[in-house]
Image (cartoon, rainbow, N blue to C red):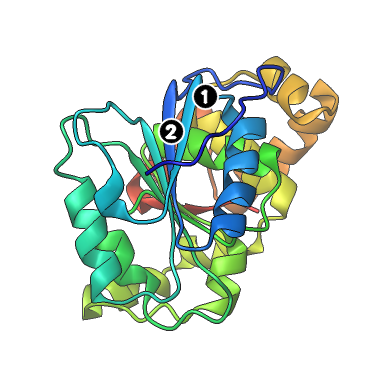
Amino acid sequence: MPYDITIDTTAPTLAAPFPRAAVISADHLCGQGVARLIERAVAPSHLDVFDTLWSIDRTTDYRLVVRQVADLDSDVEFEVAHLRTLRSPPVIALVVPPEASGSITTLISCGADLLLSGRETPQALQIALAGVAAGFCVVSPGVVRSTPAVPLSAAAHSTATDPFTSELARLTPRQREIVTLVVSGLPNKLIARRLGISEGTVKVHLTTIFRNFAAKNRTELTCRFLKSGILAVE
């Protein structure tokens, strides 16, 4: 049975809102905490909190499902695959604790869209979801730092050591936010408004980003990031 959640309708919204969302957590208090984060980040019109995946009504059109996990094991992989079979497959986010064991690459390969540490701000979650909407699988740096990412193949290993990936790791948190919003199609003026900085500051960051990735313009930068497939957002 879902827990009752009071929705804060004054929370900020994304360009692509999530009218219905669900949180799955065996820990009631943790589930409530994640629900509050979602309320503040995307202001869904309806939000349910469940203690297990199997409590979800398959006929409900959830657009965002956040699953809090203890370990990155085969059960979680199965649940992600199951969520992909829903009538309208939702954006799937997993909250991974620092002590979790397992490989995040396995979760990415089986269909997770977003890996969170649980310590993100509402603004960081907004930006991460914008990255998912732009076609990325987004991984929080908190997850990357605390969880081993074991490559699934030699090809995956070569990707992890690619110069592009190295440059991505060198971006500051603010630059990662800007890149995600650029890839989402936002102009400098809207990026500045979203991040609460001046348009001139956005241009300065973009100049550095273009130079680091040898990109001549926004289109070239977007193409390079879309080809990489994974973007880490602070």
Question: Which mark identifies residue 21?
Answer: 2
* Vertical order, 167 against 8 (above or below): below
Q: Earlier in the sequence, mark 2 or mark 1?
A: 2
Question: Which mark identifies residue 104?
Answer: none
User: How many dots with numbers?
Assistant: 2
- Position of residue 192 measured from the top left corner of the image (x, y, whole percent): 76, 24
- Position of residue 138 measured from the top left corner of the image (x, y, whole percent): 46, 51
Residue found 55% across the figure and 56% down from its top:
28
In the drawing, does residue 164 fall left or right of residue 170?
Answer: left
Mark 1 highlights which residue? 44
* Vertical order, 225 against 152 (above or below): above
Q: Quadrant of the N terminus?
A: top left
The image quadrant that residue 216 belongs to is top right
In the drawing, does residue 194 fall left or right of residue 128?
Answer: right
Residue found 57% across the figure and 21% down from its top:
186
* Vertical order, 53 against 77 (above or below): above
Residue found 44% across the figure and 20% down from its top:
19
Front residue (pair 155, 77): 77
